Image: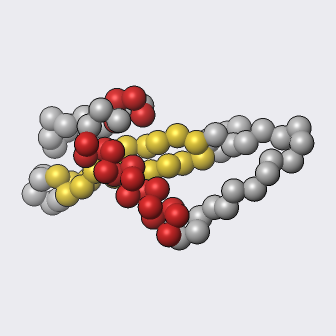
Amino acid sequence: MSITAITEPSSYAEASSHDCWIKAMQAELNALQQNHTWILTPLPPHKKAIGCRWVYKVKHNADGTIERYKARLVAKGYT
């Protein structure tokens, strides 16, 4: 059962049309950069880069109000 009528986007195309999700994605990218999560390096020959995707969640307070919109950039570990 849903707490609110707000749905979580299932793709970047859906999320990029709403300011709240754009801000959440920007916050995630800023956090990754500040934590030095990755560095760009040349890819070895004959290797493919691991893909990534965005995962979106609406976080709620105990009373059911929206606490924040959370976006996470995750690696496609199955590749």
Residue 9 visible in the displayed image: no
The answer to whether 40 is drawn above or below residue 50 in the figure is: below
21 left or right, relative to 32: left
Give percent across and percent down for residue 73: 50, 49
73 left or right, relative to 60: right
Give percent across and percent down for residue 30: 44, 61
Residue at the image position 26 percent from the left and 37 percent from the top: 18
Name the one closer to the observer, 20 or 53: 20
Residue 46 visible in the displayed image: yes
Name the one closer to the observer, 11 or 18: 18
Residue at the image position 34 percent from the left and 29 percent from the top: 14
Name the one closer to the observer, 39 or 14: 39
Name the one closer to the observer, 20 or 8: 20
Pick the quarter of the image with the N terminus.
Answer: top left
User: Number of numbered discs present?
Assistant: 0
Residue 13, by quadrant, is top left
11 left or right, relative to 49: left
Give percent across and percent down for residue 75: 60, 47
Residue at the image position 34 percent from the left and 51 percent from the top: 24
Residue that lies at the very extreme toward the right in this rendered image: 45
Residue at the image position 86 percent from the left and 47 percent from the top: 44
Give percent across and percent down for residue 26: 39, 53
The answer to whether 36 is drawn above or below residue 45 in the figure is: below
